[in-house]
Image (tube, rainbow, N blue to C red):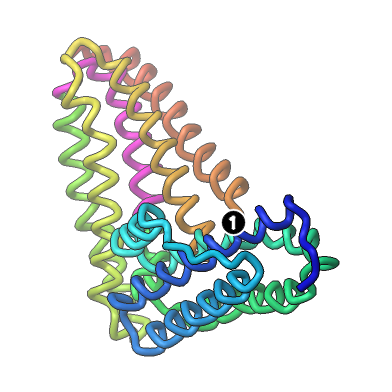
Amino acid sequence: MANISEKNMALIKRMQQNELTESCIYERISRFAKGEENKKTLRRLAAEERAHYEIWKRYTGVEMKPEKGKVFWYSMMARILGFTFAVKLMENGEEKAQDKYENLVEEVPESINIRAQEEEHEHALLDMLDEERLQYVGSMVLGLNDALVELTGSLAGFTFAMQNTRLIALSGLIIGISATFSMASSEFLAARSEGREDALKSCTYTGIAYLLTVVALIAPYLIFPSSQYMLALVCMLAIVILIIAGFTYYTSVAQEEPFKSRFWEMALISVGVAVMSFIVGIAAKAFLGVDI
C-alpha cells in the first residue's frame, strides 16, 4: 500500500467515520420509512456507505463506531420532518465534502470510484423518495401563504385601530378560524372538481397549515398586556419572518428549490401587506372617528 501523508490519513479517518455513521442513519431510517421501495433504496444506500467504510478501514486499520449523537439527530428529524428532508440534508453535507476526494487521488486512486458512487446517491435519492407529506407541500404552501398575508394584514390593521391586545387577539382569532374553514373547504372543492381522490387529505394539510399559522401569529397578543399592542405587533412580524424562513428552508432542502428568492418574495409580500394594513387602520380610525 502506498505511503499516505499524515494530512490525508487524518482526512481518510474522518471520511471513514462519516461513512459508518451515515450507513447507520440510512439503516435506522429505513426501519420506519413508509413504502417498500423507499425502504429498499435506503437499505441499499446503507450497504454502499458500509462498503466505503470498509475500503477506508483497509487504509487506516482502525475499527470505528458510529457517532450516536448524529444518528439520533437525523433519525429524530426523519420522524418529525420526514425522511426526505433528513436524508437530503445529510446528502447536502456529503456533497460539500466531495471536494476533499480531489486531495486523495494521487495517494488513494480508489477515491475516484468512491466519489462516483457518492454522486450516484443523490440521483438514487431523487428517484426513490416518494413521501406522502411532500405530495401536499403545495397545499401547505397555499394555506401558509394565505394565512401569513391575510392575517398579518388584519392584525396590523387591528393593532392601531383597536390599540388593545385582547380585542386584537379576539378579532384575529375569529377571522383566523373562519378563514381556516373557508380555505380548507375551498381546497376540498377545488380538488374534487379536478377529480382527485385525495381531496380530503389535501384540504386537511391546507387547513392545518393555516390554523397553526393563525395560532402562532395571535400568540403575542395573548401574551403581552393589553396596552403593549405595538410590542405585540413587532413580535408578530418577527414570528412571520421566522415561519417564512423555516418553511422556505424546509422546502428548499426537501424539494431542492432556491432558498433566498422564495424567502424574500414571501417576506416582502407579508411585511408589505402588514405595513399597508397598518396605514389603513390609522386612516380608518381617523376617518370614522372611532375610539375603542
Q: In percent of the image, x 29 and y 55: which residue is there?
A: 209
From the image, tell me which residue sits under label 1: 14
Residue 116 inside the magenta-drawn segment: no
Q: In percent of the image, x 31 and y 58: which residue is there?
A: 76
Image position of 289 (left or right of 142): left
Residue 225 position (above or below residue 132): above
Q: Amino acid at mark 1?
A: Arg
Decide which of 150, 106 is in the foreground and name it: 106
Decide which of 140, 97 is in the foreground and name it: 97
SS for callout 1: helix
Question: What x and y, as percent, mark residue 183?
Answer: 28, 58
The prevailing secondary structure element of the residues shown in magenta is helix
Q: Quadrant of the N terminus?
A: bottom right
Decide which of 199, 239 is in the foreground and name it: 239
Image position of 220 (left or right of 83): left
Question: What x and y, as percent, mark residue 226?
Answer: 16, 15
The answer to which quarter of the image holds residue 130 is bottom left
Residue 190 position (above or below residue 149): below
The answer to which quarter of the image holds residue 105 is bottom right
Question: What x and y, as percent, mark residue 195?
Answer: 34, 86
Q: In percent of the image, x 31 and y 67: which residue is there?
A: 187
Image position of 206 (left or right of 125): left
Residue 282 position (above or below residue 170): above
In this picture, which residue range is highlighted in magenta?
143-166
In this rendering, does residue 252 appear at all?
yes
